Image (tube, rainbow, N blue to C red):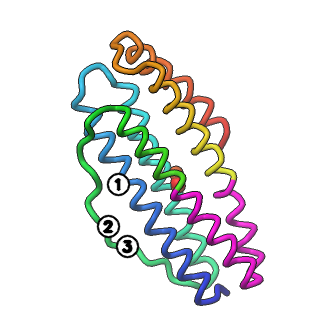
Amino acid sequence: MLGKRMQEALNEQIRIEAESSQVYLAMASWAEIQPGIDNITAFFYRQSDEEREHMLKLIHFVNDRGGFAVVPALEQPVLTFPSLQHAFKQLLEHEIFVSESINKMVDIALQEKDYATHNFLQWYVAEQIEEEALARTLNDKLEMIGNEKSGLYLFDKDILTVQVVDGNAE
Ligand code: FEO
């Protein structure tokens, strides 16, 4: 059975994962109307789907452990970006924020001696290492490219391989 404090923290994380899915969905929709970045667009849609999966996993866990998972209200995310660099920078900053939130939950699980939740959260800890590393790699590449059109073309091709690596890591 989940304690009250742990349940509240998990429900807050459900909100954050849902919000992450919306944030990346907005990036995907914006990218989709930019010319020549079809794979980057697919990447953002896929990230959005993954965040929804993270949310669902938490919902099932809370309910399976005798709690009640609350489906959250969400704010409208940022809809447009001055550049692709801005979008990817926001993605990295968002992932760092998510990692901090996961770490706070791990802390609470330990304080509450909730070892089942602690064990469950290890998947999220590992996932955040992957997601942050991926976001950093993509930001580094984009920084090197700058505003070069040919570089962006290669980046759009390249992001397909990054997706495969990320998929294998799950
Ligand atoms: Fe579910 Fe990318 O945090």
Sequence-wise first label, 3 or 1: 1
Front residue of 129 and 114: 129
Q: Amino acid at mark 1?
A: Gln
Per the rendered image, the range of residues in magenta is 97-125
On residue 74, which mark appears?
2
As measured in the structure, the alpha-carbon distance from the residue carrying label 3 to the one carrying label 1 is: 12 Å
Residue 28 falls inside the magenta stretch: no
Q: Quadrant of the N terminus?
A: bottom right
Q: Residue at x 65, y 47 (%)?
A: 129
Q: Residues within 10 Å of mark 3 (few under 14, many from 20)?
A: few
- The quarter of the displayed image where residue 70 is located: bottom left
Q: Residue at x 60, y 36 (%)?
A: 166
Tell me where residue 162 appears, x and y as whole percent. 56, 28
Residue 106 falls inside the magenta stretch: yes
Q: Which residue is mark 1?
A: 22
Q: Residues within 10 Å of mark 2 (few under 14, many from 20)?
A: few
Q: Residue furthest top?
A: 150
Could you tell me what secondary structure mostly forms the magenta stretch? helix
Quick check: 5 above or below 169?
Answer: below
Q: Residues within 10 Å of mark 1 (few under 14, many from 20)?
A: many
Quick check: 84 above or below 65?
Answer: above
Q: Residue at x 45, y 26 (%)?
A: 142
Front residue of 43 and 112: 112
Front residue of 25 and 59: 25
- Mark 3 in CB contact with mark 2 (< 8 angstroms): yes
Q: Amino acid at mark 2?
A: Leu
Front residue of 31 and 87: 87
As measured in the structure, the alpha-carbon distance from the residue carrying label 1 to the one carrying label 2 is: 8 Å
Sequence-wise first label, 1 or 2: 1
Quick check: 25 above or below 70?
Answer: above
Q: Amino acid at mark 3?
A: Pro
